[in-house]
């Protein structure tokens, strides 16, 4: 049963990266004390009253929070990830009690368990109840906090979508623990999951060996909706490896959100039939809206990425279906009408082709440098 949470505002809003950082305190029933947290809200949160945002809970906020927020702002600005709401939990004075597990057994101590429940049943509950949170949530930890983040994998009902373990300090029993979590059950969930773990040249030989054994074990898992990212960071120091691993983890965790890359096209799309390529693109954007709360329409570069499949395979018979799919997700796009018009033109149904070319042209901004070229389709078919 969820505990009641009393939120006390400690400070007025401050600003970082042009966005809001709220500093608050939670009086926790589990911890029987008050804990400080920070909440980062994207700039658009105040101007868009409908949009939902993915949530990231960042442990060790005193040094990891600003790094995560900085990456989140950059990735969103570059259209590589959605805007996120970020919660940072300060642990400078309590880290040992919060995350230092029993070295002899690898199990959480009583205090570890209390902090775990504080995150699961109080922090997440408060955020979901008071902010517009999308269904995609992430937990990020480093060192022993990364070990605590990994422990959430055992929850019968998943609490998080992404478990980011940066420079992790695991017990010698972590492989057995993860085996007991029965990760195969995630395959039955109608959702998408990520587990990021990095090894590094900066670790001791014993630590590298332990992580290598764990990563080798995890490599054997093949779960369609559970993405395991085993990384190796080569850098000059353990501090610099945190920043490197954080950006690499974010790239993988939000790969679905990004525009279709060359690697994504080559490995997942290139050999599809036109029908399956259309379904792939449609499902990509439906998932983006569901998981991340972002209604992007469809990026033109993604439309162009699969255009050749639609045109060149099966005599272009799926051009109309391609156009209809685009209009379904992005009704204001002129490209949907263009492909439908092209379908009718190739079928010698000129009046219908002109009709759709005109509709598409009408959606374009006259200042668009491509508008005149688009209108040439109408003139070419005698539809002045």
Image: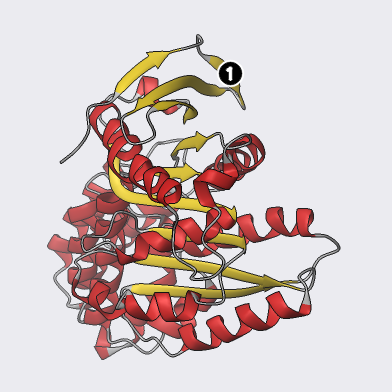
Judge left or right: residue 52 versus residue 2. Answer: right
Judge left or right: residue 103 versus residue 307. Answer: right
Residue 186: image location, x then y, percent: 26, 72
Q: Quadrant of residue 73?
A: top right
Q: Residue at x 21, y 60 (%)?
A: 157
Front position in the image: 30 or 297: 30
Q: Residue at x 31, y 73 (%)?
A: 225
**Can you say whether 89 is above or below 135 in the image?**
above
Considering every residue shown, the one lying at the far right of the view is: 236
Residue 292: image location, x then y, percent: 33, 48
Residue 119: image location, x then y, percent: 37, 42
Judge left or right: residue 310 versus residue 169. Answer: left
Q: Quadrant of residue 270?
A: bottom left
- Residue annotated with mark 1: 15
| SS for callout 1 | strand
Considering every residue shown, the one lying at the far front of the view is: 104
Residue 206: image location, x then y, percent: 72, 79
**Can you say whether 123 is above or below 313 in the image?**
above
Q: Is residue 100 visible?
A: yes
Locate the N terminus and report the quarter of the image it occupies: top left
Colouring mode (rainbow / by chain / secondary structure / one colour): secondary structure
Front position in the image: 312 or 77: 77
Q: Residue at x 44, y 21 (%)?
A: 25
Q: Callout 1: 10 Å neighbours few (<14), some, many (20+)?
A: few
């Amino acid at each position: 049963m969820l505990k009641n949470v009393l939120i006390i505002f400690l400070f007025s809003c401050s600003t970082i990266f042009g966005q809001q950082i709220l500093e608050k305190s939670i009086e926790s029933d589990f911890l029987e004390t008050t804990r400080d947290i920070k909440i980062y809200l994207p700039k658009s949160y105040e101007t868009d009253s409908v949009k939902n945002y993915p949530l990231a809970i960042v442990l060790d906020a005193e040094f990891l929070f600003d790094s995560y927020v900085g990456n989140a702002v950059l990735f969103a600005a570059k259209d590589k990830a959605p805007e996120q709401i970020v919660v940072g939990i300060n642990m400078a004075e309590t880290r040992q009690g919060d995350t230092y597990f029993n070295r002899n057994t690898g199990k959480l101590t009583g205090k570890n368990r209390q902090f775990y429940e504080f995150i699961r049943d109080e922090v997440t509950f408060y955020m979901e109840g008071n902010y517009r949170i999308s269904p995609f949530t992430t937990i990020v930890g480093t060192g022993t906090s990364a070990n605590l983040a990994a422990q959430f994998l055992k929850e019968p009902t998943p609490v998080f979508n992404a478990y980011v373990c940066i420079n992790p300090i695991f017990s010698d029993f972590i492989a057995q623990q993860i085996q007991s979590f029965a990760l195969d059950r995630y395959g039955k969930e109608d959702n998408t999951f990520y587990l990021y773990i990095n090894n590094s040249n900066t670790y001791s030989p014993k630590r590298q060996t332990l992580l290598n054994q764990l990563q080798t074990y995890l490599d054997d898992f093949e779960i369609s909706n559970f993405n395991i990212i085993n990384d190796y960071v080569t850098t000059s120091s353990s501090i610099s490896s945190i920043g490197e691993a954080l950006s690499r983890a974010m790239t993988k965790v939000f790969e679905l959100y990004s525009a279709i890359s060359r690697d994504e096209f080559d490995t997942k799309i290139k050999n599809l039939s036109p029908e399956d390529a259309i379904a792939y693109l449609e499902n990509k954007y439906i998932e983006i809206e569901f998981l991340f709360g972002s209604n992007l329409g469809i990026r033109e570069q993604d439309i162009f990425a699969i255009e050749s499949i639609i045109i060149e395979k099966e005599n272009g018979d799926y051009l109309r279906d391609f156009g209809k799919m685009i209009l379904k997700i992005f009704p204001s796009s002129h490209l949907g009408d263009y492909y439908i018009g092209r379908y009718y033109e190739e079928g010698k149904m000129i009046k219908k082709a002109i009709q759709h070319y005109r509709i598409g042209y009408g959606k374009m901004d006259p200042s668009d440098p491509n508008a005149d070229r688009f209108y040439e389709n109408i003139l070419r078919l005698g539809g002045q």
